[in-house]
Amino acid sequence: MNAVGIDVGGTSLRAGVVDEHGTVIDTARAPTPDDADALEVAIAHAVDELRSRHPITAVGLAVAGFVAVDRNTVRYAPHLPWRDAPVADRIAARIGLPVTLEHDANAAAVAEHTYGAGRGAGVVVLVAIGTGIGGALLQDGTVFHGAHGVGPELGHLRLVPDGRSCSCGKRGCWERYCSGTALATTALELLARHETASTVLAREFADDYSALTGRRVAAAAREGDVVAKQAMTQFAIWLGEGLALVADVYDPEVIVIGGGVSESAPLFLDDAREHYASVLTGAGHRPLARIRTAQLRGDAGIVGAATLAAAAAGDVRG
């Protein structure tokens, strides 16, 4: 029997039927409403669509936000309408199936540990790099939630005192130097600092630098653009710096790099590994974590949410 995993994002929700091998065998998608009741209706409709075609045992939700220790309540999600809402109970009442709730990075980590890059490892850290940085820690397959259900917030570790301002209210957070958004910011700083009229990025965005994105910087780096390559070099250094800090705290066996930016890993990961190995406390006298890119890519949240839901319902998989 199958479980449904639903990755609830700020723009859209993606639902998938996941079989016992961790394979997404069918999907449904809908825009994310900005009203809580409408969002729960949309989730229920997605589940109904999928179970009209497949037998379903349980449903798991992966949410970008603070999930309480009871794994039932969304305390706060910056891009979703839930505030201190018993989401799992409310959706379970709508669909008549057990519902499990988890932070999206934790769900992705479970998927990678069960089926992907972290399979078989005792201590796994997932660093999901996209617009910001999400983080998760697993020990022997068990998710670390912290005392109040919101740990670990790796993206808001402060790497640069008095550095770039962050939406969290602090300055110098890791995600302000190592994310898709940060990559664009670094490129803009380099464009402003140097004479770059001959570069691809300077010509393409001369009229509107605000339109520059991290994805475009990565593409320009592949094309050999000098500024883009410099930005990617800085990105790699900050990734290695942050990974060394994470490894000093958690001493993981495997670090999985996921999120949309991981698709550009050939541009930065080797340099990041080298920097990580050079600044890690006790470098040269301790084992290094294996740093791998995620294997499940965009399906990780769906697969992890479904895996957790199936386990909670008694249909333990893996």
Image: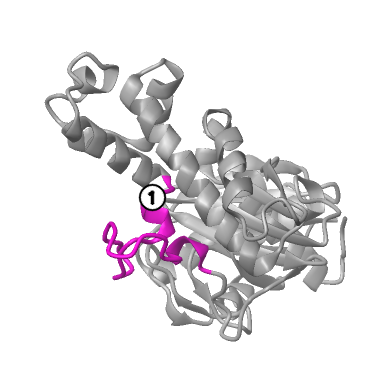
Q: Nearer the viewer, residue 266 or 304?
A: 266
Q: Position of residue 216 (x, y in %)?
A: 36, 28
Residue 128 magenta-highlighted: no
Going by the image, does 238 lie left or right of 105?
Answer: left
Going by the image, does 121 lie left or right of 61?
Answer: right
Q: Residues within 10 Å of mark 1 (few under 14, many from 20)?
A: many
Residue holding disc 1? 177
Question: Residue 26's quadrant in the figure?
Answer: top right
Who's the residue at 23% across and 34% down the image?
A: 211
Q: Position of residue 304 (x, y in %)?
A: 70, 57
Q: Position of residue 121 (x, y in %)?
A: 82, 56
Who's the residue at 35% across and 45% down the image?
A: 181
In this rendering, does residue 4 appear at all?
no
Q: Main secondary structure of the magenta part?
A: loop
Q: For the residue labelled by badge 1, is the local secondary structure a helix, a strand or a loop?
A: loop
Q: How is the image coloured?
A: one colour
The residue stretch that appears in magenta: 153-179
Residue 168 magenta-highlighted: yes
Q: Nearer the viewer, residue 170 or 96?
A: 170
Badge 1 amino acid: Tyr
Q: Quadrant of the N terminus?
A: bottom right
Q: Quadrant of the C terminus?
A: bottom right
Who's the residue at 69% across and 42% down the image?
A: 292
Q: Nearer the viewer, residue 90 or 225?
A: 225
Q: Position of residue 199 (x, y in %)?
A: 26, 17
Compared with residue 202, is residue 25 higher up or lower down, i.e. above or below?
Answer: below
Who's the residue at 60% across and 75% down the image?
A: 88
Q: Nearer the viewer, residue 137 or 75?
A: 137
Compared with residue 102, is residue 7 higher up or lower down, i.e. above or below?
Answer: above
Compared with residue 298, is residue 107 higher up or lower down, i.e. above or below?
Answer: below
